């Protein structure tokens, strides 16, 4: 018997992956939802989970089949919204968890969306550019029966980018017979993308950290920041923190970890990596290489995981010295690690708030596409700052008032919105 009530039969109870974390987070919020908790299973089961076979011709003439997924966890408040991940470790239960977090994130920010996510179980680094294009187009056609600007709007996630969004937009548009810019966000600017989208998730991490630091009496200037992941989120976060006076003292990515106590210039590191194809962080001059284990013990004020799930565990949580853990990644902290950090007085800015900058500017992109009227970057950044600061304030104040961890407070606000919508819509028929 599973410890989780009403588990769908299509999941293996012994191997739930991040879905177990999501279920545990739902269990933690239910006592705070009053009468709405009768709708708990709305959160415990995705509305729709599509598994697709994605066959493509490889460059060598063979045919290979890949597994693809699109999960719409909830659409009570509006169309599904969430990224697409290309990674060899993608599973149905991982995509379900990521979709569930999108439901909560979109509601926490009061965006008019439900939550969705997609993925392909593939290592894109093993594919040529034309194989990458073929897998993207075939996957888009396969999930085309459930996506659309008013149904479900994909966006970039791990190992997907503007290039891939352009192919997705084109494939969907070809299939429906008209150009549909609003079907995906995170597109290139010349195809209806939004200014400010590329850095939005990292910028949002900075905004919520700044707000937390103000309330905690901490200074941004000179604050030491350690970042795991130097991709879309980690790279942008590093630049925005650096530009605002913080010091990036350690960075870890898939290649390893580097450390420099007086700060790494993220712009210079990015330029170095761009100039030297094949080079990794570890080739960067003037930094100390440290082990991936030592990374978690680095003396710093802010620890910003921006890579994958389950990185802060019961094993390393006790060694983290930062006062603030800012979840740039989705689901980087296990519930057991969260308990350890909270017991030590560490403040965790939860993923559903800390990395919501990306979907917030995706929403701005979708609105601009629908109205064919485009905003300035200054306007977008100001609106992003306002949206995240307001969401932060509501979550922080509720956490103080009810003595809750910030994650639970964020879930209370978000799940109340989702389940109120669920209840008002009623059951059909
Ligand atoms: P990305 O593919 O651009 O970058 C991922 C980074 O993680 C790379 O630097 C990679 O080297 C590193 N990495 C991979 N495996 C690692 C490992 N085992 N140890 C250390 N580092 C490792 O992905 P991204 O878009 O930056 O997404 C990162 C996280 O942020 C994911 O959890 C994603 O769901 C979340 N997120 C992304 C966005 C977005 O707008 N892209 C928005 C919200 C949340």
Image: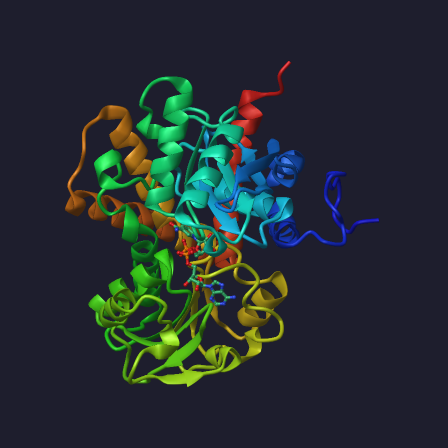
Q: Residue at x 29, y 30 (%)?
A: 367
- In the image: residue 382, left or right of residue 95: left
Percent across and percent down for residue 184 are 37, 34
- Quarter of the image that includes the C terminus: top right
- In the image: residue 207, left or right of residue 59: left
Q: Nearer the viewer, residue 220 or 285?
A: 285
Q: Nearer the viewer, residue 223 or 155?
A: 155
**Does residue 367 show up?**
yes
Within the image, what quadrant is residue 46 found in?
A: top right
Q: Is residue 384 above or below residue 141?
A: below
Q: Nearer the viewer, residue 272 or 316?
A: 272
The extreme top residue here reads 429
Within the image, what quadrant is residue 376 found in?
A: top left
Q: Is residue 80 above or below residue 355?
A: above
Q: Residue at x 51, y 44 (%)?
A: 58
The extreme front residue here reads 61
Q: Is residue 392 above or below residue 136?
A: below
Percent across and percent down for residue 268 are 23, 71
């Amino acid at each position: 018997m599973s410890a989780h009530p009403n588990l769908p039969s299509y999941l293996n109870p012994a191997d739930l992956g991040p879905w177990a974390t999501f279920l545990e987070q739902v269990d933690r919020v239910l006592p705070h939802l009053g009468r709405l908790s009768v709708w708990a299973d709305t959160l415990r089961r995705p509305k729709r989970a599509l598994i697709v076979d994605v066959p493509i011709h490889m460059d060598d003439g063979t045919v290979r089949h890949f597994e693809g997924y699109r999960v719409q966890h909830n659409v009570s408040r509006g169309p599904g919204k969430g990224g697409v991940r290309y990674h060899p470790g993608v599973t149905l239960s991982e995509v379900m968890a990521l979709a569930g977090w999108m439901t909560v994130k979109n509601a926490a920010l009061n965006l008019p969306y439900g939550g969705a996510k997609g993925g392909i179980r593939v290592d894109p680094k093993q594919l040529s550019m034309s194989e990458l294009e073929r897998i993207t187009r075939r996957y888009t056609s396969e999930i085309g029966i459930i996506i659309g600007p008013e149904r479900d709007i994909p966006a970039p996630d791990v190992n997907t980018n503007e290039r891939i969004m352009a192919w997705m937009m084109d494939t969907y548009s070809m299939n429906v017979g008209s150009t549909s810019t609003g079907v995906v966000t995170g597109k290139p600017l010349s195809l209806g993308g939004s200014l400010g989208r590329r850095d939005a998730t990292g910028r949002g991490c900075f905004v919520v950290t700044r707000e937390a630091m103000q309330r905690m009496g901490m200074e941004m200037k000179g604050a030491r920041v350690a970042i795991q992941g130097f991709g879309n989120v980690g790279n942008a976060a590093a630049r925005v923190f650096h530009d605002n006076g913080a010091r990036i003292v350690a960075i870890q990515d898939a290649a390893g970890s580097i450390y420099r106590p007086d700060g790494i210039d993220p712009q210079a590191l990015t330029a170095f990596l761009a100039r030297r194809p094949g080079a990794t962080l570890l080739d960067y001059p003037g930094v100390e290489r440290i082990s991936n284990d030592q990374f978690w013990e680095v003396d710093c004020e802010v620890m910003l995981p921006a890579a994958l799930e389950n990185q802060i565990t019961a094993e390393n949580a006790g060694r983290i010295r930062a006062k603030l853990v800012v979840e740039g990644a989705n689901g980087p902290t296990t519930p057991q690690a969260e308990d350890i950090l909270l017991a030590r007085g560490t403040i965790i800015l939860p993923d559903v708030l800390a990395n919501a900058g990306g979907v917030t500017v995706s929403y701005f992109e979708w609105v601009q596409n629908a109205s064919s009227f485009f905003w300035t970057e200054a306007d977008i950044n100001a609106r992003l700052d306002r949206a995240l600061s307001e969401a932060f304030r509501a979550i922080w104040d509720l956490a103080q008032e009810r003595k809750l961890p910030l994650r639970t407070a964020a879930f209370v606000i978000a799940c109340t919105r989702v389940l109120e919508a669920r209840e008002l819509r009623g059951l059909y028929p």
